[in-house]
Image (cartoon, helix red, strand yellow):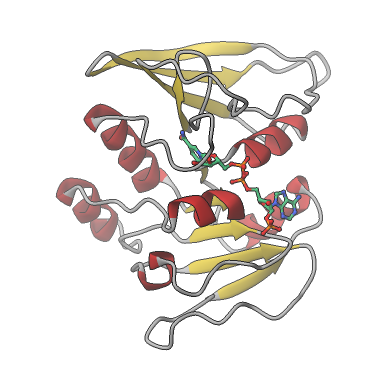
Amino acid sequence: MLAVSLDGRLAPPAGGAAQLGGRGDRRALEEALAWADAALLGAETLRRHGSTCLIHAPDLLAERVRQGRHAQPPALVLSRSGQIPGDLPFWCQPLQRWWLTPAAPMPPTPPAACSGWHRQLGFSSWPQLRQALAAEGLQRLVLLGGAQLAGQLLAAAQVDELQLSLCPLLLGGPHSWLPASQSLPPGQWQLLEQRSLGDDELLLRYCRRPLPGD
Ligand SMILES: NC(=O)c1ccc[n+]([C@@H]2O[C@H](COP(=O)([O-])OP(=O)(O)OC[C@H]3O[C@@H](n4cnc5c(N)ncnc54)[C@H](OP(=O)(O)O)[C@@H]3O)[C@@H](O)[C@H]2O)c1
């Protein structure tokens, strides 16, 4: 799920955190996190934002606890380099931090008071990762960005639903929500939901139509 401008950008021309969405988008984001077993994000998104999204709404937190789940879904961070600065607020957020990595370098050292990575999981392909996560009981995944990960997951046909919050801004610049260089398999998407989020924002939810032979 992503918040995008009317011209399909997820960050301003200079890059970095855009804070595109308003209150309605925040609620939709927290609802998606409340549904999820885990939230996936690229290391660049984490480096740019410094932290990941948490559920704050008391009703959503209470419902997760009632279901016997952790209040927050674990954050799964994909990184080759493992370069996540140790002073980011991320390291002190109240959730589990999993590092998904194709290699096995030593984890970066977080501040002493924080708990660092809880798990490290090998990554060789998106289908392999989905299987490995399912084996850990993590089946409902929400992608929090950014564009590189969205492009790779779509290219690997590993996205079941697209949820875009269309925000009333024109940003311009190179940061489309999919990398311009990313080639994608053919496919059509079926509209499941269109909902006003207030503040001139529109939520669009699509599911992937199966291709012949799927
Ligand atoms: N509007 C929104 O809803 C929204 C949401 C999220 C992000 N954003 C914006 O998106 C931008 C960041 O997006 P991005 O596309 O530049 O980066 P990204 O997708 O967040 O992360 C890219 C990083 O992920 C790691 N990675 C990617 N593919 C990998 C693979 N196959 N194996 C191992 N590691 C892999 C690499 O980390 P290492 O370099 O550590 O190896 C890579 O640098 C920021 O400007 C952010 O503000 C917007």
Residue at horizontal 38%, vertical 46%? 33
Residue at horizontal 44%, vertical 15%? 170
- In the drawing, does residue 60 fall left or right of residue 33? left
Quarter of the figure with residue 18: top left
Give the answer, above or below, for where 176 lies relative to 64. Answer: above
What is the x, y in percent for residue 6?
Answer: 45, 13
Which image quarter is the C terminus in?
A: top right
What is the x, y in percent for residue 2?
Answer: 47, 31
Quarter of the figure with residue 174: top right
Quarter of the figure with residue 198: top left
Which residue is situated farthest in the front direction here? Answer: 14
**Picture mark count:** 0
Given residues 148 and 127, the one toward you in this image is: 148
Residue at horizontal 64%, vertical 78%? 107
Instruction: Specify whether residue 103 is in view.
Output: yes
- In the drawing, does residue 98 fall left or right of residue 112? right
Which residue is situated farthest in the bottom direction here? Answer: 112
Given residues 71 and 147, the one toward you in this image is: 147
What is the x, y in percent for residue 196?
Answer: 28, 14
Given residues 155 and 177, the one toward you in this image is: 177
Instruction: Specify whether residue 42 is in view.
Output: no
